[in-house]
Image: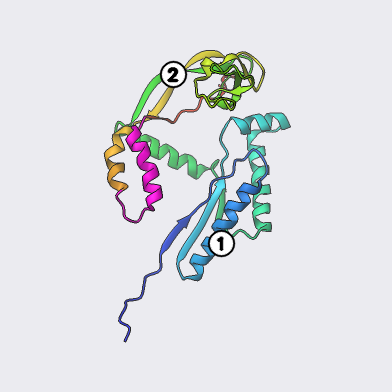
Amino acid sequence: MNTTAPISPRRILVTSALPYANGSLHLGHLLEHIQTDIWVRYQRMRGNECHYVCADDTHGTAIMLKAEEQGISPEQLIEQVRTEHIADFNDFLISHDNYYSTHSDENRNFSNSIYLKLKERGFIAERTITQAFDPEKQLFLADRYIKGSCPKCKAADQYGDNCEACGATYSPVDLIDPFSTISGATPVEKDSLHYFFKLPEFAEFLDTWLNNKKLQPAVSNKLREWLEAGLIEWDISRDAPLLWL
């Protein structure tokens, strides 16, 4: 007689990498979502409670620039792209339980709540940093929006953080003849106040959590590389274009 107790159904929350809201889906998006959808359907067939949620990632300079290029507001672009993404997923019969947007009241409220609780407990640091700034577009430039010649091998047309020719890594201020890929202007250095999450204060907690036997060894080992290298404070700030302020 089989006396093995029945296994209780699992409750599983699943997501995929969020597609960026500045353009159409590509093959990589569909490959990941189809693979995830197959796994979700399998779990449901096993009797497990499995919820598949995802959303468009709607924040960033690329979206602002794409909307400007099309002569519409970022909010209009976000809605257009989301409608297109949902239609494409539906055509491939992807079974999202909810496909939403990071540009939502819920996301804003949760983000505010998390930030304020961290700040109240002393886990947020403030300090001024210096960044590359486009004087024509009046915005701070991420590394990918700065190009110039590599300071190591002198190869032209390299991005602001690494050289694809020789593999060197560097700071954007080290580039030779740097220029903004947005306007072509020469970047200048500009200070702004940024906020940092004090991640190093959670090193012991994360080290203990990584002993969780349910984690895949490959995942645990990869995360331990970051702990062994030493956690650094996480810059959670993004500077708005000065023309918007």
Q: Is residue 5 above or below residue 190?
A: below
Amino acid type indicated by mark 1: Ile
Image coordinates for residue 4, horizontal then vertical, percent: 32, 78
State which tag comes first along the sequence, 2 or 1: 1
Residue 79 vs 149, above or below: the answer is: below
Along the viewing direction, whichever of 176 and 135 lies nearer the viewer: 176
Image coordinates for residue 155, horizontal then vertical, percent: 61, 19
Q: Of helix, strand and loop, which one carries label 2? A: strand
Which span of residues is magenta-colored? 211-232
Q: Residues within 10 Å of mark 1 (few under 14, many from 20)?
A: few
Q: Quadrant of the C terminus?
A: top right
CB-based contact (under 8 Å), mark 2 and mark 1: no
Residue 110 appears in the picture as rendered: yes
Q: Which residue is mark 2?
A: 129
Q: Which residue is mark 1?
A: 38
Q: Nearer the viewer, residue 111 or 54?
A: 54
The residue carrying pointer 2 sits among few (fewer than 14), some (14 to 19) or many (20 or more) residues within 10 Å by Cα, namely few
Q: Residue at x 58, y 60 (%)?
A: 95
Q: Nearer the viewer, mark 2 or mark 1?
A: 1
Q: Is residue 229 above or below residue 220?
A: above
